[in-house]
Amino acid sequence: MSSKVLSATTLGLTSHLVEVEIDTHSGMYVFSIVGLPDATVKEAKDRVNAAIKNCGFKPPYQCGHVTANLAPADIQKVGPLYDLPIALGFLLTTKQIDFDTNGKLFVGELSLDGKIRPVNGVLPIAMMAKEKNISEIFVPKENAGEASIAGGLKVIPADNFKDLVAHLLGEKIIDPHPEQDLQKVFEPQTYHLDMAHVKGQEHAKRALEIAAAGGHNVLFSGPPGSGKTLLAKTFPSILPPLTFPEALEITKIFSIAGKLPREVALVSQRPFRSPHHSASAVSLVGGGQFPRPGEISLSHRGVLFLDEFPEFSRMVLENLRQPLEDGSISVSRAQATLSFPARFTLIAAMNPCPCGNATDPEKLCSCSPSSIIRYQRKISGPILDRIDIHIEVPRMKFDKLASEKLGESS
Amino acid sequence: MTAARQRQQARFKNLDGIIANSEMTGQQMKEFCQLGNNELDLLRKAVNQLQLSARAYHRIIKIARTISDLAGAEQIEIPHLAEAIQYRQRQT
């Protein structure tokens, strides 16, 4: 006796349909999960056992030999989202419940008491489900808002396993998540920092204006305390507002990386990422055994701010060459070669020398010429060649700092 | 700012996936970034004297395009190009 329930897996940014097949036969208790599962998928058997028992059904450990197959068997399955389809498939196979599985897709992690916990990457799954003409998608309650963005799907928010089973049997109906008015989800942006708060530095602001208008990269160079970081932080306030397709792209990436705040359904601000200079190559450009997006993909359609540019390890910075040119990064691993979008505006800030005063007309620079050259060599020519706007940010004079006059607002 | 982006939107409305000037390919640059003779002269001098790379050449034109968008100009003019050139990295 066997049954089939639909679920999904996500490779890179694209989701694929997964059929969860469950079969049981008599014999000693064995619960095996096949179809290239990783450790989190394999652990599903313990969660499924406990959740089913605690919801008052007969659990797998009393049913002999249980096999769960996640088809297609040649795509790697990662994450705990198969708990829910495996549990439902098991109840169907053992005839404890019966419902029509056609056109229904399930994702969710089970806790031991039967509660359904949120998972990552629901938006790309919902969009794939819509393309494959699936009519109903069952997701953890916390992910319902995210799933409803795909539109044209009946999104059922599942809070716990018992209620979900009651819904499927038609005993107690769960209301579908209301179709979102996308205008409402798409909140206006608010920024804490306004460019008017930066005094002086008019030419740097002009450079930022050009960068914002055309999406060009900028490198600031100047002594410490001259306002490079503040200028960069005010940059998002002059960027054009996000369009809906852009927001969808960003939300997809954030959803897969697990960086989407639970209460937010749609990212409505341009991302501003400022990784610390101790960042590793993988964290910056993406990667890992099952490739995940890195900082450059998380700043897609937004800003990647690299403060203290020469302090980043050279190896890490050289990785930026391809994405700066192509607007995407392809990550090759033994498991798969995946491409993530990475069209960001790079804002980099650096001091001209180790002490920082090399370009200051009044303050004395204490660095030897060779140490200055060594410092500037840390950033390779090919990287500098890809940055279109090089700007010097000088130290501010007292008169300008103390003046009450505000600059031009964003 | 907004006007500059709107100009770009109108320019790229038939091209999929391109939003900003910095994303233009060589083919599209030929179409949208025509330079006059005076502008070409200036650019030739700059490229020769500053020993700029082919990438730098293209990037300067893209920035000049953005600057002329900000200025509301149809064509790239000398001041736009000059401003774009001075943003390039200076050899130290």
Image: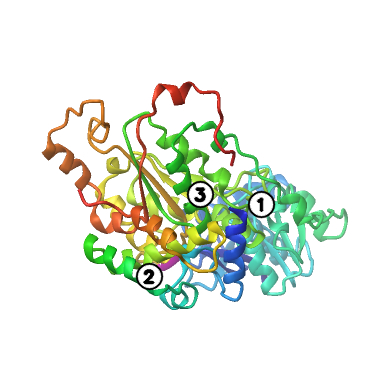
Name which residue lies at 57% across and 59% down: B4
Identify the disc placed on residue A266: 1
The residue singled out by tag 3 in the image is A209
Residue A241 appearing in the image:
yes
Name which residue lies at 39% across and 66% down: A335
Q: Is residue A11 above or below residue A39?
A: below
Q: Which residue type carries mark 3?
A: Glu
Report the Cα–Cα distance between label 2 and label 3: 26 Å
**Closer to the camera: disc 3 or disc 1?**
3
The spot of residue B59 in percent (x, y) is 38, 64
Residue A76 appearing in the image:
no
The spot of residue B42 in percent (x, y) is 33, 66
When asked about the image quadrant of residue B80, the answer is bottom left
Within 10 Å of disc 3 (Cα), the crowding (few <14, some 14-19, many 20+) is many
Q: Which residue type carries mark 1?
A: Leu
* In magenta stretch: residue A156: no
| Residue sitting nearer the eye, A50 or B72 | B72
